[in-house]
Image: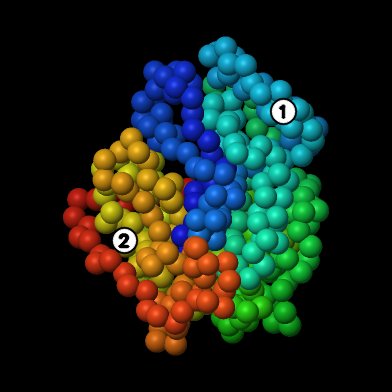
Amino acid sequence: MTVGTHNSYKRAIPPADYRLIHAMNPKVAQELDYAHKDLTAQLNAGARQIEIDVVYDPQGGRYSRPLIAARTQTTLDPTWGKAMERPGFKVLHVPDVDFRSSCVTFKLCLGIVRDWSRAHPRHAPITILINAKDGKAAPGGVPLLSFDEAAFDALDGEVRSVFTASQLLTPDDVQGRYPTLRDAVLHNNWPKLQAARGRILFALDETPEKVAIYRGARVSLEGRVMYINTDEQSPAAAYLTLNRPVEDGERIARDVRAGFLVRTRADEGTWQARGNNRAHRDIALHSGAQAVSTDYLWADPRFAGGYTVSLPSRAASMCNPIRMGDRCGNMAVEYVDNSDWRKARAAPIVWPDRRATDGMPTTITK
């Protein structure tokens, strides 16, 4: 169990851009008003789940002239421009609007994670969630290219160009000799912790239509790099996105006990942080989901109360109390400030009291 970050690459929107967005839609502007430190800092702080949004750019240069930069007469970094001109997947939140990333290309983001992992080879497994962005562009912006099978093949190819097979934990690794991935998961065929340390797994967190394209005609996910966000009955079931820990609390606990990996969210749209409302966060942390995602690994100094999300006792990862119960529940398996895994002590993690949920919003989206 770990805390992760949502849109982990995202940089702050400059004041001139923010004013323009706010003039068009104040609600959207407020929802976009968060940022993260770079991926290395997040991993150093204990995040073992990150999220990357990718757009398809096989020719290069498609998203290199953001509309909002032209309207605010912003001079863009030439290094950024050169990276954007190269063919390959780009990492952008909202092309033409909220486009600033700490790692502008997918390969660059992956290389940062790879290098950190090599420097900390006994880390708990890291999950990288992928959103494959397409659909409507911002008004007046460049249309996003759709993800077809060729695009997903190329996406898998970029992952394999950065990570070796031994660094990855793929669906085939888990499925083994079982007839489907779901069968393997329900028979607890995930690798043991010691075998999973230092490894990276990817999950495509997308709509049923997109994951169907990624899966293709496969029985499960044979040959693919990524797990997919699907339902519990699919032969390809191993990972689920259940972002509403209040409404889906029973389902999260049931799925975790069954052996599925689950991601949920502690906050959304800056609302909880602005009001220092920790109730939703506390329910998410107690839900049993293996990854609890946040926009606030660090507090935003603009907001009173210091809202943040982390595991207690400076744990980076801990045994899952829902999944493992008394066997090792509430024990740290990795600490934030301790790269030497052997020094992790078998002392119970002390959780803060869970707060009341009266009056809090409960709907969380991607």
Judged by depth in the image, the label closer to the viewer, 2 or 1, is: 1
Q: What amino acid type should be assigned to the residue bearing mark 2? A: Asp
Tell me: 279 left or right of 87: left
Residue under circle 2? 282
* In the image, farthest residue toward the bottom: 327
Q: Secondary structure at mark 2?
A: helix
Q: Is residue 255 above or below residue 30?
A: below
- The structure residue drawn at horizontal position 49% and vertical position 25%, both measured from the top left corner, is 14
Q: Residue at (39%, 22%) from the top-left corner? A: 22
Side of 164 relative to 121 (left or right): right
In which quarter of the view is residue 9 placed? Answer: top right
Q: Is residue 2 above or below residue 320?
A: above
Residue 247 vs residue 146: left or right? left
- Residue 226 appears in the picture as rendered: no
Rendered location of residue 248, percent (x, y): 37, 63
Mark earlier in primary sequence (2, 1): 1
> Depth check: 325 or 94 in front?
325
Disc marking residue 8: none
The image shows residue 31 at horizontal and vertical percentages of: 40, 36
The residue depicted at 41 percent of the width and 29 percent of the height is: 29
Q: CA distance from mark 2 to mark 1?
A: 41 Å
> Which secondary structure, mark 1?
helix
Q: Position of residue 200 (x, y in %)?
A: 66, 63
Q: Which residue is mark 1?
A: 79
Neighbour tally class for label 2: few under 14, some 14-19, many 20 plus, Cα within 10 Å: many
The front one of 21 and 277 is 277
Residue type (three-letter) at the residue carrying disc 1: Thr
201 vs 141, nearest the viewer = 201
